[in-house]
């Protein structure tokens, strides 16, 4: 089953700090000349990493709408932290919340509880609405080191190539792409 997730609530923090970005670029911590540009580059680097790896770094809330659910339903993006709610349109076409005792989260999948009976739902493309929380932590404390390294490379690339001319920065992109592939693989030797 293929479906799109939609962002409900974005992150309240970035996985990189301004101090980390300045250290990467060897800019003095007291130099605030480029702070606005660096904050923008940090957000852009996070967005690029999340897009390329189909993952989320700091907590965000997402929602999917689907016509039916199945046991072992893999939710888009990772890591899934928790399921906030599951709602469905009942036979009378009223939006109803499904009791949390009827399902559970197992890694990144929605799983049925033992011996449940699915409720009768309306025949609609969006009969089920699953809202869930993604990410490693509220702040950057649990973000994987490989993700932080890759985002720092992107911040450096964006900062050094802000005039849109490609120069030696293409090396950073290659290293970044290698980190994306490494992170995306389920196992890495």
Image (cartoon, helix red, strand yellow):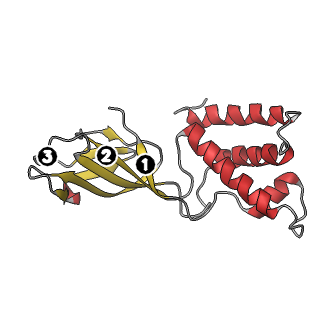
Please report contact status of discs 3 and 1: CB closer than 8 Å, yes or no.
no
Q: Determine which residue is flagged by label 1.
A: 6
Q: Secondary structure at mark 3?
A: loop
3 or 1: tag closer to the N-terminus = 1
Which of these two is toward me, 9 or 23?
Answer: 9
Q: Is residue 76 left or right of residue 140?
A: left
Q: CA distance from mark 3 to mark 1?
A: 22 Å
* Number of other residues with Cα within 10 Å of mark 1, as a class: few under 14, some 14 to 19, many 20 or more: few
- Residue 41: image x %, image y %? 73, 52
- Residue 138: image x %, image y %? 54, 64
3 or 2: tag closer to the N-terminus = 2
Q: CA distance from mark 3 to mark 2?
A: 13 Å
Residue appearing at x 70%, y 47% in the figure: 151
Q: Determine which residue is flagged by label 2.
A: 65
Q: CA distance from mark 2 to mark 1?
A: 9 Å
Q: Quadrant of the N terminus?
A: top left
Q: Secondary structure at mark 2?
A: strand
2 or 1: tag closer to the N-terminus = 1
- Residue 35: image x %, image y %? 80, 63
Q: Determine which residue is flagged by label 3.
A: 121
* Number of other residues with Cα within 10 Å of mark 3, as a class: few under 14, some 14 to 19, many 20 or more: some
Q: Quadrant of the C terminus?
A: top right
Q: In the figure, residue 180 lies in which quadrant?
A: top right
Q: Is residue 145 visible?
A: no
Residue appearing at x 56%, y 65% in the figure: 12
Q: Is residue 99 left or right of residue 120?
A: right
């Amino acid at each position: 089953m293929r479906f799109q997730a939609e962002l409900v609530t974005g992150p309240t923090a970035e996985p990189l700090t301004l101090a980390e970005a300045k250290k990467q670029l060897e800019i003095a911590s007291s130099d605030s000349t480029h702070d606005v540009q660096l904050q923008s580059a940090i957000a852009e680097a996070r967005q690029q990493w999340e897009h390329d790896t189909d993952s989320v770094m700091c907590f965000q809330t997402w929602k999917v709408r689907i016509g039916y659910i199945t046991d072992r339903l893999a939710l888009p993006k990772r890591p899934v932290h928790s399921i906030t709610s599951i709602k469905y349109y009942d036979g009378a076409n009223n939006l109803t919340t499904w009791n949390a005792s009827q399902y559970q989260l197992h890694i990144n999948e929605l799983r049925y509880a033992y011996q449940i009976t699915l409720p009768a739902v309306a025949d609609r493309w969006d009969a089920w609405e699953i809202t869930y929380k993604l990410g490693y932590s509220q702040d950057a404390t649990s973000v994987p080191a490989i993700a932080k390294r890759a985002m720092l490379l992107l911040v450096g690339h964006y900062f050094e190539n802000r005039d849109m001319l490609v120069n030696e920065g293409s090396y950073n992109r290659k290293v970044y792409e290698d980190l994306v592939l490494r992170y995306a693989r389920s196992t890495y030797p």
